[in-house]
Image (tube, grey):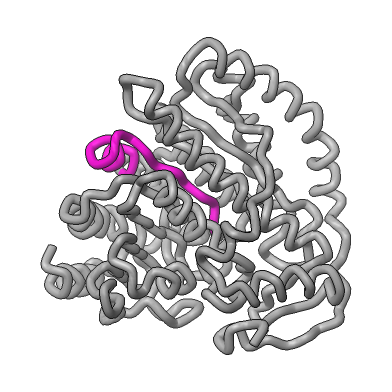
Amino acid sequence: PLFDPMARPRVDLTRAAPASPRASRRAERHPSRARRIASASAFASASSSPSLLFATSAALEHMQLGHPESNARVPAILDALEAGALTAAARPGEVLEITDVAPATKKALERVHAKNYCNGLELLCATRAPTNLDTAPTYCTPSSFQDVMLGVGAATRLVDEVIDRAKETKEKAPSAFGLIRPPGHHAVPRGAMGFCLVGTAAAAARHAQLRGHKKVLIFDYDVHHGNGTNDIFRDDDSVLFISTHEDGSYPGTGKITDMGEGDGLGATINIPLPPGSGDKAVLSALEEIVVPAAARFQPDFIIVSAGYDAHWRDPLAGLTFRTGTYHRLCTKLKELANEMCGGKIVFLLEGGYDLVGLSEGVADSFRALLGDASTDVGEIPGLRDEPDDKVRKVLTEVKAMHQV
């Protein structure tokens, strides 16, 4: 079949709407911004070793009117980075944007998806788009296949840059961040699902392995379980997949008892956090489960599925991460990469549908990776208390099952 049964394929001939006026205005500003950043990037590349690399694949033509996974997401992030002086132009020598990104090859997709699905998606976008692929709805437009190919190309290019630059420096490798959409962690081996068309993080992990980094840790802190990544590596012990997500949220997978199977049994660790969990819960999960599991696994490379829909502002779920939660997560994940694999870590954007929460969260992640302080300080009125007892029960059960 063209799509996996989990994706509940259907055809909806509702036409995708053009970009919103606000997104269009932002897009019009991008060429001048790109020229400024490219100039600063060339200087940085020639004169020093940057601390943070990033690449952008905004998919501005991948858009459906009223859909939360909109083409305003990456422009909102870029605006926040510019406002926070976190761009290459503002931080020459520290931040470098990789601008000469090429689309991935079909082979890169076929390492994580069935060949007939890759061919079918390309044909569908060319002949039947705009259309919906499931009831989420996951949509595609005429540009969507080219968009995901460029997104995977950006992700694998960042993997290459981190690996190559690690060889050139006596210091730790630079961190990298892919501002890429559409997201990818729900896409299953034979189909699209949950706003995701292809598994970008999975493809990046396979690429790192092709570059000689045989053991890859993928940590997914999106509010929704990364079921696609989970399934792609279900029976593979060379990839350790760990997910923190909201229990009971879409797509309903990611139970503690899902530990992988076959050779991959034990290489999947799911941590379903109860609704209302926030900063304390996820940082406890990181310290008590992710870090010791990583120490046992000894990864050669780390990929992070960086979703920002666990932010308390996000409308699609019920966790209560603060903006500063992402700063603390990224700080600790970079420390983990420094300790385990010479600093080799790539963050790839997944969800995040409130533009303020998304852009603030990514900007604070950049601050963490640059060693800057978080801008999220003070109390947030009305932010509910975390369900500490329920969280402790989950963490205790996961630790017992995985012996960490």
Q: Position of residue 384 (x, y in %)?
A: 38, 63
Position of 65 relative to 306 (above/below) = below
Magenta region: 333-350
Which residue occupies the foreground of this view, 33 or 340? 340
Left or right: residue 326 compared with residue 392? right
Position of 155 relative to 393 (above/below) = above
Position of 38 relative to 306 (above/below) = above
Which residue occupies the foreground of this view, 384 or 396? 396
Is residue 73 part of the magenta span, yes or no?
no
Residue 204 seen from this side: yes
Is residue 345 part of the magenta span, yes or no?
yes
Count of numbered circles in the view: 0
Q: Residue at point 67% right, 55% down?
A: 149
Which residue occupies the foreground of this view, 177 or 377? 177
Q: Position of residue 33 (x, y in %)?
A: 74, 28
Q: Residue at point 57% right, 78% down?
A: 190
Q: Position of residue 192 (x, y in %)?
A: 62, 75
Position of 5 relative to 256 (above/below) = below
Which residue occupies the foreground of this view, 308 or 52? 52
Specify the quadrant that holds the N terminus: bottom right
Q: Where is residue 91, by image quadrant?
A: top right
Q: Residue at point 67% right, 33% down?
A: 99
